[in-house]
Amino acid sequence: MSEPIVFISHFGLKDGALEGFREMQREAVPQLEADKPRTLAFLYYLDEAGSEISIVHLFADADSMDAHFEGAAERAGRAYEYLVPRGWEIYGRPSPTALETMRRSAATAAVPLTLRPTYEAGFLR
């Protein structure tokens, strides 16, 4: 049985970057939705101060996460004009390749990577 994966990324917004980031996302999110049909959810949440953003990704399985990660370095490069990594969380078991990519990214950015690999119960519609 394939197991769902929730991937949450946390970022700080660079000073004065909120509007530029929003403008970029007005183009990037619809393109991502079209290009990544196996990504079940891709949701941005902004804190009240407008200085921190979290992105919630939902995948049906590890293969879907791998498909989403294709081209991620290019997308991240553009986003990092506005964002500073703060940490990542993975709930579920990503592929070994995706896990190694996230471990390297966390080490490079000197941010935490939280792993909760064991899916116990629940449902995904």
Image (spheres, rainbow, N blue to C red):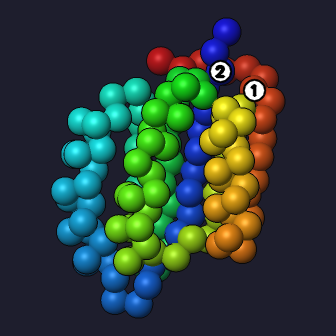
Q: Which of the 4 quarters of the picture holds residue 48?
A: bottom left
Quarter of the image for residue 38 reads top left
Quadrant containing the N terminus is: top right
Q: Left or right of 19: which side holds 43?
A: right
Q: Are marks 1 and 2 in contact (CB under 8 Å)?
A: yes
Looking at the picture, how far across and down is residue 32, in whole percent? 30, 44
Residue 111 coordinates in the image, percent (x, y) = 70, 70
Which of the labelled discs sits on residue 57, or is there none? none
Report the label total. Answer: 2
Q: Earlier in the sequence, mark 1 or mark 2?
A: 2
Q: Which residue is mark 1?
A: 119
Query: What residue lies at 40% left-to-right and 48% top-to-bottom?
Result: 71
Q: How much space separates mark 1 and mark 2, taking CA atoms?
A: 7 Å
**31 versus 107 height, above or below:** above
Horizontally, residue 22 falls left or right of residue 43, namely: left
Work out whether residue 92 can be spotted.
Answer: no
Residue type highlighted by circle 1: Tyr
User: In what element is the residue under mark 2?
Assistant: loop
Give the residue at x 22% y 45%: 30
How many neighbours does mark 2 have within 10 angstroms: few (below 14), some (14-19), or many (20 or more)?
some
Q: Which residue is mark 2?
A: 3
Residue 32 visible: yes
- Nearer-the-camera pick, 51 or 99: 99
Callout 2 amino acid = Glu
Q: Residues within 10 Å of mark 1 (few under 14, many from 20)?
A: few
Q: Residue sitting at 53 percent across and 35 percent down?
A: 66
